[in-house]
Image (cartoon, rainbow, N blue to C red):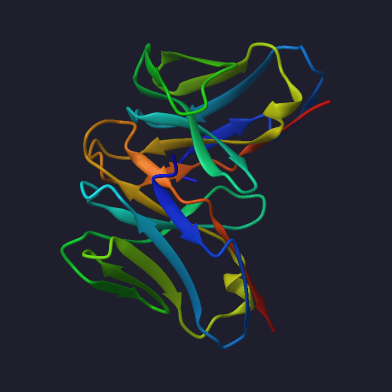
Amino acid sequence: DAGITQSPRHKVTETGTPVTLRCHQTENHRYMYWYRQDPGHGLRLIHYSYGVKDTDKGEVSDGYSVSRSKTEDFLLTLESATSSQTSVYFCAIRLTRDLNSPLHFGNGTRLTVT
Amino acid sequence: QQQVKQSPQSLIVQKGGISIINCAYENTAFDYFPWYQQFPGKGPALLIAIRPDVSEKKEGRFTISFNKSAKQFSLHIMDSQPGDSATYFCAASIKTGANNLFFGTGTRLTVIP
């Protein structure tokens, strides 16, 4: 898993509550990504980061925010969780600065919003 | 708009058979085509990748065939094994920025013993 730790691995929360997912890497890789995975949709990019405090939106960013205050941690926050945000969330890193190098994924966080 | 279209959505193959997953794209600027394999409870992991200057790449039982003129590429798994049962994602990449990798919707492969 290339030194990526996602926490928590599972979470159940209620509609309307804020939720924060954490992605931690053990090396100083520049690029970090948050994806969600849903049946029939594959992997969709939520937000990504290209350095400390440098983040940008992906294709499904509504209802999500991110922060990267230090290189090793990339946090994903659901400001007010909704049932449509029930999903499996994956963090990924790019191990080199080559933008055509592959991504390496964590093992995911399964989030259920009731 | 789906940048990379993948089919089939699911596939059942007998042990020893050939599994074939197809992908198509429109953007001719894509210049890197990786395939990812995902087992239940795990994140996707790079399986094999190809660049458009070659028509085929083989690694063990896994082969990517690439047709640049048709803008299609496919994954062939020869002598499929039950341990190959997983979800497979094709992807395409363009070297223009950090948000540059586009995934297909995935194929769930089941190999029957």
Q: Picture coordinates of residue B71 (x, y %)?
A: 28, 60
Q: Is residue A3 above or below residue B34?
A: above
Residue at point 19%, 68% (across, down): B54
Q: Is A43 placed left or right of A14 in the picture?
A: left
Residue at point 41%, 29% (across, down): A32
Query: The N terminus of chain B is located in which quarter?
Result: top left
Q: Picture coordinates of residue B97 (x, y %)?
A: 25, 31
Residue at point 32%, 27% (across, down): A30
Q: Is residue A77 above or below residue B40?
A: above
Rendering quarter of residue A15: top right
Residue at point 44%, 66% (across, down): B22
Q: Picture coordinates of residue B103 (x, y %)?
A: 44, 47
Rendering quarter of residue B72: bottom left
Q: Is B17 placed left or right of B94 in the picture?
A: right
Query: The C terminus of chain B is located in which quarter?
Result: bottom right
Q: Picture coordinates of residue A34 (x, y %)?
A: 50, 30
Q: A114 or A109: which is nearer to us?
A: A114
Q: A83 or B25: which is nearer to us?
A: B25
Rendering quarter of residue B9: bottom right
> Among all residues in the image, which is located at the extreme left?
B53
